[in-house]
Image (tube, coloured by chain):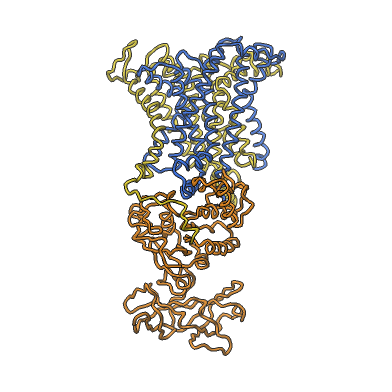
Chain colours: A orange, B yellow, C blue
Amino acid sequence: MPDRSMIEIRNVTRSYGTFKALDDANLAIREGEFFSLLGPSGCGKTTLLRMIAGFDTPTSGSILIDGQPMDGIPANRRPTNMVFQSYAIFPHLNVEQNVAYGLKRMRLDAAEEKRRVDEALAMVSLAGLGKRGATELSGGQRQRVALARALVMRPKVLLLDEPLSALDKKLREQMQVELRRLQQAVGITFILVTHDQYEALAMSDRIAVMFGGKIAQVAAPKEIYQRPVNRQVADFLGGMNFIKAEIVDDAGTSIVVDTLGFGRVKTDKPAAYVKNGSAATIGIRPERLRVLWDDATARHEVAGTVVERHYFGEITHLIVEVPGMDRPLSVTETNDFGADDLPLGATIRLGYDPDALVAMAD
Amino acid sequence: MTAAAEGSIAYRKARQNAKPLLQSEAARGFALVSPTLAFAVVMLLVPILVVIAHSFWTQNYLTVDYTFTLEQYRIALTEPIYRDLLLRSLFISFSVSVLTVLLAYPIAYYISFHGGRHKNLWLFLITIPFWTSYLLRVMSWKVILGYNGVLNSGLLGLGIIDEPSTALLYNSSAVIITLTHAWAAFAILPIFVSLEKVDRTLIEAATDLGDGPIRSFLRVTLPLSMTGVISALLIVMIPTVGDYVTPKLVGGKDGVMISNAIQAQFGKALNWPLGAALSVSTMLVVSAMAAASVLLLRLLVRRAR
Amino acid sequence: MKRLLDRWLPAYAALYIVFLYLPVLLLPIFSINTSAVPKFPLSGFTFKWYEELPRTTALLDAAWNSFIVGIAASLLATILGICAARAITRYRFPGRRPINGLIMAPLILPEIIVAVSMLLVLQRMGLGLTLFTVVLGHVLICIPYSVTVLTSGFEGFDRSLEEASADLGETAWGTFRRVTLPMMAPAIISSLLVSFTISLDDFIMAFFLAGTETTLPIYIWGQLRFAAKLPSVLALGTLLLVGSFILLTIAETLRRRAERRTHLTGVAVA
């Protein structure tokens, strides 16, 4: 698939009085991509989605869909369709009528309309439920109807506004897999708005992380998780140990730093890295620190004392104090070797891969 | 990509200048409300302003003298007949509203706290009588309270009295009873709504903190349902002051109210300015009484806490 | 205290219902009583008071007038009510509260003052008093009820339903026709029925604004002066009571259906 842009967001700002819900955002979303807008509530992700759909208008800047500027084009004439957070299933219509709602305006012949409705219902595993009343559906079924109703329009872009947030945990995880599978089957560009980092990581080709109306980082899930550009992104995506460091050498794409506890480290520089004098922050995810049992060794080690232990079933969370470091390390360890039995006060050694250390802006 | 590329929605050229006229939220809302607003202005606001204007004029048979004068107010407020009518109307509307609210509160409380699944049925049951012809309801009370009426014949039959009482009908109490009945639903509904909004865990919290049922009612339920009590009081007090049918049918000589005088000025007597001044005075005085009642009530409730 | 309440509150509630219904139930009872004087014990069963009704031309004229006025007033009040209720629930605009206050004011103003104010202005404008002026008056007093009924129908309405419609390619008018209107239909019908009932029952506005025309309440008012006519008035009243009861039961059922519908759309969000 070529890297053609399906959506282009060019210098888009949306302000309400003095408050900027979205501040000079620039973004290109590729054709056929599963793209997520991830961030805490109020970060501007929903505002951006609603502007793409045509329910909100940028204060300045422009939005292009498939190369066409969208200025002045209302929602009903855009090649996008949306799955609403509340699903917005028309309660006075049955499943079939809901799905056929948008088709009615195209004046297809009856047989063709029925074929497309059935096809869409089959796609979301609701075949045979067409006559069911909208008010008789479970949460999961409502979500599927909303999906079918949007997909039947064959949009260029499908917009999903927190579509899984109303479902319970188990159903949510099941729908994540299904949504991803569906997107790959139809090949349409999906844009998902979510505040759930696991959801974004599990489903997306690429993610834009947003804070306070600004896009902080756009990258593939693995990149976002392992190489966050700053502490805010790192924090939002999961636990991270932040280590104070001093820059010794800054050459091209990598830098060499002296750290408290981890010695001298050479590490990659993220693309959007911003240098702040000679001080730097190095991060390492808790699960990238492994407890070294008995006489096992690693090329890179750090020793410390267990001060807290929290049991989570399949994993245990350890807080380890390392001499010379200003604050303790968080370590996530699977329980197969007995991390849940480590006594408080025990001295342990932790092994790590230098690649797991990442430099980031504050 | 074929499915997506089919492009079910046709593109049209961006029409830069075709921004809808009523784009802003405020403009759209205002446009939508304007027909109703215009009707209310023409049929209510303007007429009331015209009435106020009239109250400062004088009328000599059919010709209106437009010189500003407070003469009508002097007549309305100091002439014994009007003053007495006004005072009696105030007394009646005050009694009716207090009585209605007192009688309505337990019912609203019962429905809200003990109505269970039948809350809606109870509310429906209470509103039904209110929807039957007002004239006939008043008429019914005349039948009940009359000399040969239901109450007298019932009491006679039970041997409680020897001869029919004439004290039941054609006086202020008959008016008060009839109006209390007529306005019941208007008092129950707002109190019920406010009681429904009382978070039940607050009452449990009060009990948990050591309050008995009476104290938790006085310190939690009652203050929180006060908005309902106040709106019930106002919604009964202000309209009843101007009731026309009830005093006319069951009030007799001793139950005549200000509305009967207002009607006379606009009817037979044909003295619009005086009728206007009576109307305006009634509204002002009843508003003052309503405001005072609300203040007093708030004070009392604060005491109870 | 709690025991006392548990025991006495239901008894009080029952007593209150008796108080509310007693006057209303006397109408049908005395309307089938042979005696022209309404008193106990009843003297005998008859339908003669009902049989008289269709032969009274003045009554039929008044009933027809009331019907026409009721239809016109309920239609106008509901249309104006839709505008106001939708504007108030859907949009934020400056002056929303005072405007709402003015529209709802007839609910709390003494009706006679509203009526004489209108009378004064209509007279000064030189507009003759006809059934049309009665309709104007009835629309004014029906609007607050219409707005209340419609607002409760509009309030739970999930805005994203209209957005979903636009998103699926529908125009603003199409959205109104295919989503908003069907969703609102029960509330609208309910508003029509409630307004019709109010108009049918209203005496004061008609009394001041009808001129020489008569509506049902004016006819009844006239009859009340004659003691001998009382039973037939009670018969008429009984018919009106049954009529209102049926209309309002329909209105209430529809209102509840509308409420359930709007509530169900919210289930997924909750």
Horizontal relation, residue C29 to residue B255: left or right: right
Residue C189's x, y, as percent?
Answer: 54, 33
Which of the 4 quarters of the picture holds residue A246?
bottom left
Q: Can residue B99 be seen in the rendering of this structure?
A: no
- Taking depth in this image into account, of B69 and C141 the one nearest to the observer is C141
Which of the 4 quarters of the picture holds residue B18?
top left
Residue furthest out toward the left: B67
Q: Which residue is depicted at the point 47% across and 24% down?
A: C138
Horizontal relation, residue B170 to residue A67: left or right: right
Vertical relation: A42 (above or below) C171: below
Residue A289's x, y, as percent?
Answer: 51, 80
- Taking depth in this image into account, of C94 and C157 the one nearest to the observer is C157
Q: Which residue is depicted at the point 42% across and 30% down?
A: B287
- The mark tally for this picture is 0
Residue C238's x, y, as percent?
Answer: 62, 20
Vertical relation: C167 (above or below) B227: below
Q: Which residue is depicted at the point 46% across and 37% down?
A: C85
Vertical relation: B242 (above or below) C182: above
Q: Can residue C198 be seen in the rendering of this structure?
A: yes
Horizontal relation, residue C143 to residue C241: left or right: left
Residue furthest out toward the bottom: A295
Q: Which residue is depicted at the point 45% across and 39% down?
A: C86
Residue C129's x, y, as percent?
Answer: 42, 16
- Taking depth in this image into account, of C106 and B97 the one nearest to the observer is C106
For the C terminus of chain A, the image quarter is: bottom left
- Taking depth in this image into account, of B214 and A348 the one nearest to the observer is A348
